[in-house]
Image (spheres, rainbow, N blue to C red):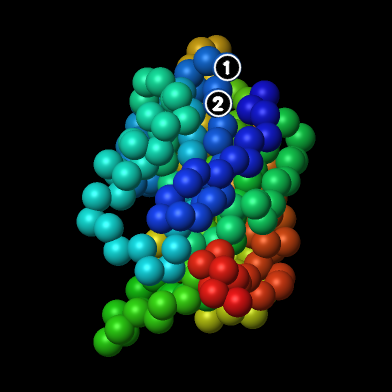
């Protein structure tokens, strides 16, 4: 079972900036679209770090790697970024499947819509971290990402927002590295079904209220 993350802070530009840290007891097989540690393979930790809305670095993976070093995290891991205050993380369980989501929906977009002339500078990232307690095949892990994304899109639609997500959303799904493989991760599969329900519940709960970006709160 993956435990709840630790909420901590880092000192950056004279401010204490929040971060969520999952320190894994042993490596977990992971599929992720994160800027650091994206792709497929065993991972030892996950970090979800708040950044100001003015964040415009072109080296987010290097930045996250330095944060991991500061935290004393060893080996490969996953690093996520968001303008949301990660202290507002929403956790939901469905059976033994666990999901955590930081939900910023200030910039909802339809995935296949034409790109706008300029992106709005409002908080707009949904980061999802999910744990499935059974070994998923590679195909099932890929399918689990699709399932989580579909459940997120369903929640956004039910919240009445005109989008399927935001331009910067990321998904991370973790599972054990050993044991019998489960071949499926779709929304009607043994593990995909509770994953979909947990993601839907977390994104719905996180998206109900108005999310103020962390850096906007500091500005008063």
Residue 93 placement (x, y as % from top left) = 74, 41
Gap in angstroms between the C-alphas marked 1 and 2: 7 Å
What residue appears at the point 40 percent right and 20 percent down from the top-left corner? 74
Q: What is the number of the mark on residue 23?
A: 2
Q: Nearer the viewer, residue 32 or 111?
A: 32
The residue most toward the left is: 58
Asked if the residue under mark 2 is in contact with the one under mark 1, i.e. CB atoms within 8 Å, the reply is yes
In terms of secondary structure, where does tag 1 sit? strand
Instruction: Specify the quadrant of the image occupied by residue 129.
Output: top right
- Residue at 63% of width from left, 41% of height from top? 7
Numbered mark located on residue 62 in the image? none
Return the residue at label 1: 25
Residue 164, compared with residue 7, is above or below; it is below
Please say if 73 is above or below 105. above
Question: If the image is split into quadrants, where does the C terminus sit?
Answer: bottom right
Taking the view exactly as shown, the residue that stands out farthest to the top is 179
Q: Is residue 135 visible?
A: no
Furthest residue toward bottom = 117
In the image shown, does 140 or 202 lie closer to the viewer? 202
Q: Name the outermost residue toward the front.
A: 14
User: Of 186 and 76, which appears nearest the observer?
Assistant: 76
Provide residue 217's location: percent of width, then percent of height: 59, 71
Percent position (x, y) of residue 90?
69, 52
Please determine whether, in this image, residue 59 is positioned above or below residue 152: above
Residue at (54, 51) in percent of width and height: 16
Mark 2, secondary structure of its residue:
strand
186 vs 4, left or right, is: left
* Residue 118 visible in this rendered orientation of the protein: yes
């Amino acid at each position: 079972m993956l435990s709840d993350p630790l909420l901590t802070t880092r000192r950056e530009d004279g401010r204490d900036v929040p971060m969520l840290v999952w320190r894994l007891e042993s490596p977990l097989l992971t599929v992720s679209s994160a800027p650091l540690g994206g792709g497929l393979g065993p991972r030892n930790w996950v970090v979800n770090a708040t950044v100001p809305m003015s964040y415009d670095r072109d080296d987010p993976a290097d930045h996250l790697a330095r944060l991991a070093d500061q935290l004393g995290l060893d080996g490969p891991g996953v690093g996520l970024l968001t303008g949301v205050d990660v202290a507002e993380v929403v956790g939901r369980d469905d059976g033994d499947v666990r999901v955590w989501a930081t939900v910023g929906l200030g910039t909802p977009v339809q995935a296949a819509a034409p790109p706008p002339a300029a992106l709005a500078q409002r908080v707009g990232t949904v980061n999802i971290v999910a744990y499935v307690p059974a070994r998923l095949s590679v195909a099932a892990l890929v399918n689990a990402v699709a399932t989580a994304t579909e459940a997120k899109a369903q929640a956004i639609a039910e919240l009445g927002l005109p989008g399927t997500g935001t331009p910067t959303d990321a998904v991370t799904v973790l599972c054990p590295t050993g044991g019998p493989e489960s071949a499926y991760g779709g929304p009607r599969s043994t593990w995909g079904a509770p994953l979909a329900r947990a993601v839907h519940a977390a994104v719905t709960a996180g998206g109900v209220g108005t999310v103020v970006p962390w850096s906007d709160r500091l500005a008063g």
